[in-house]
Image (cartoon, rainbow, N blue to C red):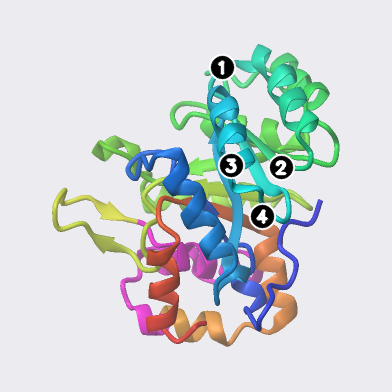
């Protein structure tokens, strides 16, 4: 299923539908009414082509539907369903979404994998989620992590990489991200999703926490180099926004589309921050 069609209003293919809206989740934790109002405002704004799906927990579907009934959207909300009730809750959650097709359009289902990412579990994921919906599974980093990533890909799902969180150990190293990219790019037709702490375009140190955050532009350029045989680790480590932007801008359209076939999207707590960064780097 193609998730990254050319964005409207001249959005470059490299950034079309790149940013999924995770305003309901930490660190934003925005209330449902405010999150939806902001999402629909962005969807009707100048940079709507950068905006991807709206993320909502399965346990909050009734709340989401109640608010959408009040809003009465002109088109169904593109949704990524985040499974927080266990694999057994998937069929019911999907049934609820499908019963409200005038309000919701299910594009993606995301869930954490069990520690061993066993094949029986992955087969059940495939059985529960409709074929036209993207399945995203997050293996835990640790011993055997990359084997888990391979298993996820082999079963037709996108692996997810968590790029940060509330503690230092939540941030994968440059080597770990590079190894992840190598596995995914080495699997024909595979795509991945990224999440957490990719607030800004370029790698930087957070002044409040002291944690070094990965940048989503670093990930895009690293993905391009992964596909072309370039220095992936250097791209991930770079803090030179201008150099990264120049390299991204210079990608021919077929190369940019190939990058986005690999790097499907990432979840951001704020839509305004990534758009502002791309604007400052003259990429939008």
- Could you say which is closer to the camera, residue 138 or residue 200? 200
Query: What is the spatial separation of the Cα atoms under label 3 and label 2, in whole angstroms?
Result: 11 Å
- Are the two marked residues, 4 and 1, in contact with CB atoms closer than 8 angstroms? no
Q: How far from the left and from the top, in percent, is residue 110? A: 61, 34
Write down the residue under mark 4: 185
Instruction: Say which quarter of the image contains residue 276.
Output: bottom left
| Between discs 1 and 3, the one toward the N terminus | 3
Query: Which is more N-terminal, label 2 or label 3?
Result: 3
| Of the image marks 1 and 2, the number of the one nearer the N terminus | 1
Q: Nearer the viewer, residue 144 or 15?
A: 15
Mark 1 Cα shell of 10 Å, populated few (<14), some (14-19), many (≥20): few
Q: Residue at x 52, y 64 (%)?
A: 42
User: Circle 2 is placed at which residue position?
Assistant: 103
State the separation of the CA atoms marked 4 and 1.
Answer: 31 Å
Residue 112 seen: no
Q: Can you see residue 104?
A: yes
Give the percent coordinates (x, y) of residue 63: 54, 29
Q: CA distance from mark 4 to mark 3?
A: 43 Å
The answer to if 90 sits in the magenta stretch is: no
Residue 43, percent across and down? 59, 63
* Label 1 sits on residue: 85
Q: Which residues are magenta?
A: 214-243
In the rendered structure, which disc, 4 or 1, sits on the residue that comes first in sequence? 1
Q: Position of residue 247 (x, y in %)?
A: 51, 82
Of residue 226 and residue 162, the one placed in the foreground of this image is: 162
Q: Can you tell which of label 4 and label 1 is closer to the viewer?
A: 1
| Residue identifier under label 3 | 70
């Amino acid at each position: 299923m193609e998730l990254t069609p050319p964005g409207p209003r001249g959005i470059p293919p490299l950034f079309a539908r790149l940013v999924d809206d995770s305003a309901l989740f930490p660190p934003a934790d925005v209330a449902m009414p405010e999150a939806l109002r902001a999402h629909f405002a962005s969807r009707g704004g100048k940079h709507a082509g950068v905006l991807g799906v709206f993320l909502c927990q399965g346990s909050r579907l009734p709340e989401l539907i109640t608010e959408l009934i009040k809003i009465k959207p002109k088109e169904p909300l593109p949704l990524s369903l985040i499974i927080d009730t266990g694999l057994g809750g998937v069929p019911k959650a999907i049934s609820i979404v499908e019963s409200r097709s005038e309000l919701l359009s299910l594009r993606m289902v995301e869930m954490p994998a069990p520690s061993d990412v066993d094949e029986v579990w992955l087969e059940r994921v495939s059985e529960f989620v409709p074929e036209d919906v993207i399945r995203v599974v997050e293996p835990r980093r640790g011993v055997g992590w990359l084997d888990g990533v391979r298993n996820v890909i082999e079963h037709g799902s996108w692996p997810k990489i968590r790029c940060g969180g509330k503690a230092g150990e939540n941030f994968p190293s440059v080597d770990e991200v590079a190894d992840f990219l190598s596995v995914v790019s080495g699997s024909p037709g595979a795509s991945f999703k990224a999440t957490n702490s990719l607030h800004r375009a370029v790698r930087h140190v957070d002044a409040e926490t002291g944690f070094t955050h990965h940048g989503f532009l670093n990930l895009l350029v690293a993905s391009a180099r992964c596909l072309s045989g370039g220095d992936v680790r250097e791209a991930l480590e770079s803090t030179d926004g201008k150099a990264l932007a120049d390299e991204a801008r210079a990608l021919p359209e077929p190369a940019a589309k190939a990058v986005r076939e690999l790097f499907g999207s990432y979840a951001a707590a704020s839509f305004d921050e990534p758009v502002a960064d791309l604007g400052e780097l003259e990429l939008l």
